[in-house]
Image (cartoon, rainbow, N blue to C red):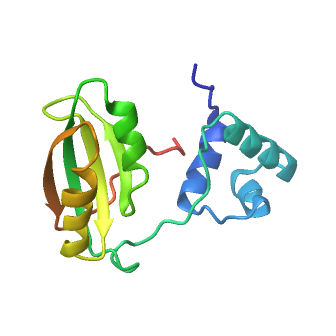
């Protein structure tokens, strides 16, 4: 069961998503709660796994990963766990999702160049036991979506 998020929890999430480096003091001032309350709520959001972690967001191109692609993967029935485990070990794979539809797995790959992308897809992904086929969709341009307005 998902934890209940009240207006203050949503305000905390909105502020942290806007600036993950905001200090507890500034966060508390921004949403008009005490620092102790802010600490308690953030700790609860972390322990309830609403907040999965705190990270930096990289600009892939500026970080040297100028080639991005979505790779669709068709796998043998009942091989999801072993395929997912193997995919997690491959450098440059940023995201792995089990999906429903014409293929089974969707993978986001970010590499320095086409040669590295070719190596990841044709040599690393396709050699995994249980992988039947792949299709690669190059990403030409990306934009962030709207997501959820947690402040509402």
Q: Quadrant of residue 44?
A: top right
> Looking at the image, which residue is at 52% across and 44% down?
150
Q: Which residue, as the protein is rendered here, is positioned at the far top?
A: 1
Q: Quadrant of residue 109?
A: bottom left
> Looking at the image, which residue is at 59% across and 45% down?
52
Q: Is residue 147 visible?
A: no
Q: Position of residue 46 (x, y in %)?
A: 68, 42
Q: 104 or 131: which is nearer to us?
A: 131
Q: Position of residue 25 (x, y in %)?
A: 79, 61
In the displayed structure image, the side of residue 65 where residue 5 appears, left or right: right
Q: Position of residue 133 (x, y in %)?
A: 14, 43
| Tag count | 0
Q: Is residue 98 visible?
A: yes
Q: 19 or 125: which is nearer to us?
A: 125
Q: Position of residue 73 (x, y in %)?
A: 21, 42
Q: Quadrant of the N terminus?
A: top right
In the displayed structure image, the side of residue 42 where residue 128 appears, left or right: left
> Looking at the image, which residue is at 76% across and 43% down?
43
Q: Quadrant of residue 130?
A: top left
């Amino acid at each position: 069961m998902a934890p209940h998020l009240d207006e203050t929890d949503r305000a905390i999430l909105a502020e942290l998503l806007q600036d993950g480096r905001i200090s507890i003091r500034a966060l508390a001032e921004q949403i008009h709660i005490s620092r102790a309350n802010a600490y308690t709520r953030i700790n609860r959001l972390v322990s309830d796994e609403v907040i999965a972690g705190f990270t930096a967001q990289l600009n892939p191109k500026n970080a040297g990963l100028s080639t991005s692609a979505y790779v669709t993967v068709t796998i043998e029935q009942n091989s999801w766990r072993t395929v997912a485990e193997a995919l997690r070990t491959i450098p440059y794979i940023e995201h792995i999702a089990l999906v429903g539809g014409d293929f089974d797995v969707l993978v986001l790959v970010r590499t320095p160049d086409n040669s590295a992308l070719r190596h990841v897809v044709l040599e690393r992904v396709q050699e995994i036991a249980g992988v039947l086929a792949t299709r690669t969709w190059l990403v030409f341009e990306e934009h962030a979506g709207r997501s959820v307005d947690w402040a509402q």
